[in-house]
Image (cartoon, rainbow, N blue to C red):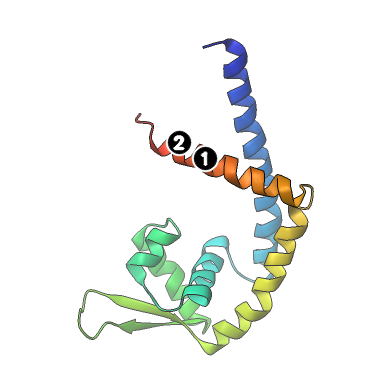
Amino acid sequence: MASEEIKQSLKLYIVLSRAHKAINEVTNQFFQENKLNPTEFAVLELLYHKGRQPLQVIGQKILLASGSITYVVDKLEKRGYITRTACPSDRRITYADITSEGEVFMAELFPRHEQQLHELTNGLSSEEKEQAIQLLKKLGLSIKDLSY
């Protein structure tokens, strides 16, 4: 493989990392201003848009260890944003539900988050965003096929 191709791959990694860092810094600041961390927001966002979820599924969907989910759910429950419900037919399953207070909070917060993401990505045209989505999706799927 030509060393120029290797340098280009390294440059792609650096550019992706810097773009990710820039977006995360701004969004994490937004979450902090609203007294959340990114994981708490991810749990609330999932429940807000998808409804009741088993705790185990939440961990899988937002890529978090089960012990960490318990901690995050505890914090959100104490704030009144979610509740836990035991599954009547399987005692091993516990569901998380967003409360009406959580719904109100997310109904106000999520549109602001969406608008902020829109503003953060406005450096690209609509066509460029679509192209970036397709290329990054292609890259992510191709990595899954590699074995290390």
- The amino acid sitting under disc 1 is Lys
For disc 2, the marked residue is 142
Give how far across and how far down residue 89 sits, in percent: 20, 83
Query: Neighbour class for label 1 at 10 Å: few (<14), some, many (≥20)?
Result: few
Amino acid on which disc 2 is placed: Ser
Q: Position of residue 115 (x, y in %)?
A: 73, 65
Q: Residue at x 54, y 89 (%)?
A: 100
* SS state under label 2: helix
Q: On the picture, is 125 further left or further right than 113?
A: right
Q: Viewer-proximal residue, 9 or 128?
A: 128
Do tag 1 and tag 2 residues touch (Cβ < 8 Å)?
yes
Q: Residue at x 43, y 55 (%)?
A: 63
Q: Is residue 114 above or below residue 88?
A: above
Q: On the image, numbered disc 1 is attached to which residue?
A: 138
Q: Secondary structure at mark 1?
A: helix
List x then y, in percent, for residue 64: 42, 57
- Residue 3 in sight in this render: yes
